[in-house]
Image: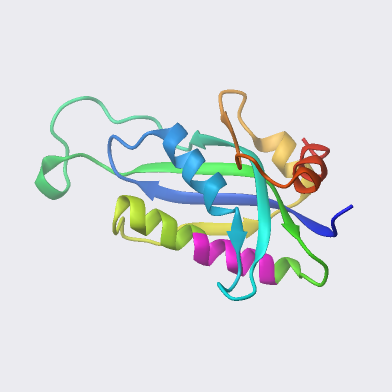
Amino acid sequence: MLDSLIVPLFVTTDLPPGADLAEFGELLAETMRELGPRDGGYQGFLAGRVFWLDQPAPAGPRPGPGGEGELRYAGMLGYLAAAGAGHTVRQVVGDVRRAIGAAVAGRYGDVGVAPAVFAIRDHDVRERTPDSALPVGTRDGAADLVGATRSYL
């Protein structure tokens, strides 16, 4: 069995108007596949759920650049399995924060603030995830990481 560290996570960020929640979830999940430095990183696997933290704005012109509308506030609660021995929660969360920040900026551009990434308590993932949240997971993850993570769901 592969050594791994399981980290319960909460991720929040602003997204541009019209952003697709499922696409955002897929972006997060696939970003977790490889973490850490490029020349010595480690595999990751994310299993979680994404959801809106706000209500959609009414239709029609809205304030913002070009009248495009207001930013939406999205969240993800889930579990990340980080492969390998010797990782600390602080190190893994830092690697996740950098990876998600780069991925969100690359996909959506500058939304004004970097995504927030927090390690949270295990029971908070189960208790605070809305029933309407969409499931997300890293595709084709290492079997040991998938098994370790799914046991928490």
Counting the numbered discs, the total is 0
Q: Of 17 and 36, which appears nearest the observer?
A: 36
Q: What stretch is highlighted in magenta?
A: 91-99
Residue 151 placed where, x, y %? 83, 38
- In the rendered view, would you say 89 is above or below 140? below
Residue at 85% x, 56% y is 2
Residue at 14% x, 49% y is 65
Residue at 64% x, 74% y is 40
Q: Of 39 and 68, which appears nearest the observer?
A: 39
- How is the structure coloured here? rainbow
Residue 69 placed where, x, y %? 21, 39
Residue 138 placed where, x, y %? 61, 42
- In the rendered view, would you say 57 is above or below 40? above
Q: Of 146 and 110, which appears nearest the observer?
A: 146
Q: Residue 101 vs residue 38: left or right? A: left
Q: Residue 88 vs residue 65: left or right? A: right
- Can you tell which quarter of the image residue 3 is in? bottom right
The image quadrant where one finds the C terminus is top right
Residue 79 placed where, x, y %? 70, 46
Residue at 39% x, 30% y is 55
Residue farthest right in this picture: 1
Does the magenta portion include 92?
yes
Does the magenta portion include 28?
no
